[in-house]
Amino acid sequence: MCGETGADYLSDGGGVAFAPKLTRAKKAHRCHDCSKEIQPGHLYVKRAGTYEGDFWTATLCASCERKARWLNANGHAWVIGLIAKDYEYCRFGDHTKEPEIEP
């Protein structure tokens, strides 16, 4: 979860991420990480890439994108769908033990 890497979240060599695109919403979207609704007129980030031969896309709200960038800047790997948890653990958590997993 909080792996030390010097690269992006696809550092395992299984995929390629394209440059994120900052976009202003024309219609409502849902963040792929926190599931909050992105309202029309609000900024969000479109991400896309390939992983093990499959194309993927993701929409991230501004808050989750900031957390993902903080994780990258501080050498931590992250996965879409777990950005908020990874951020909380890496920034504030106890690094001597694994985070608790909710049932």
Image (spheres, rainbow, N blue to C red):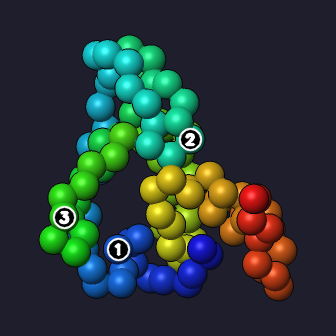
The kind of residue on which mark 3 rests is: Asp
With respect to residue 91, does 11 lie above or below?
below
Image location (x, y in percent) of residue 55: 18, 58
Could you give the CA–CA distance between mark 3 and mark 2, rounded to whole angstroms? 23 Å
- The residue that mark 3 highlights is 54
Q: Picture coordinates of residue 54 (x, y %)?
A: 18, 64
Q: Which image quadrant is residue 70 in? A: bottom right
Q: CA distance from mark 1 to mark 3?
A: 13 Å
At 41% from the left and 71% from the top, the residue drawn is 9
Q: Amino acid at mark 2?
A: Cys
Dot 3 or dot 2: first in sequence order is 2
- Quote the CA–CA distance across marks 2 and 1: 20 Å
Residue drawn at (80%, 68%) of the image: 100
Who comes first in sequence, dot 2 or dot 1? 1
Residue 3 placed where, x, y %? 57, 81
Give the residue at x 56% y 57%: 82
Quadrant housing the N terminus:
bottom right
Name the side, left or right, on which 53 lies relative to 51.
left
- Name the element at disc 3: strand
Which of these two is toward me, 11 or 19?
A: 11
Q: Which comes sooner in the sequence, label 1 or label 3?
A: 1
Dot in front, 1 or 3: 3
Q: Mark 3 Cα within 10 Å, few/some/many (few <14, many 20+)?
A: few
Can you identify the residue that label 1 sits on? 10
Amino acid type at circle 1 is Leu
Give the vertical position of 6 relative to 42 (above or below): below
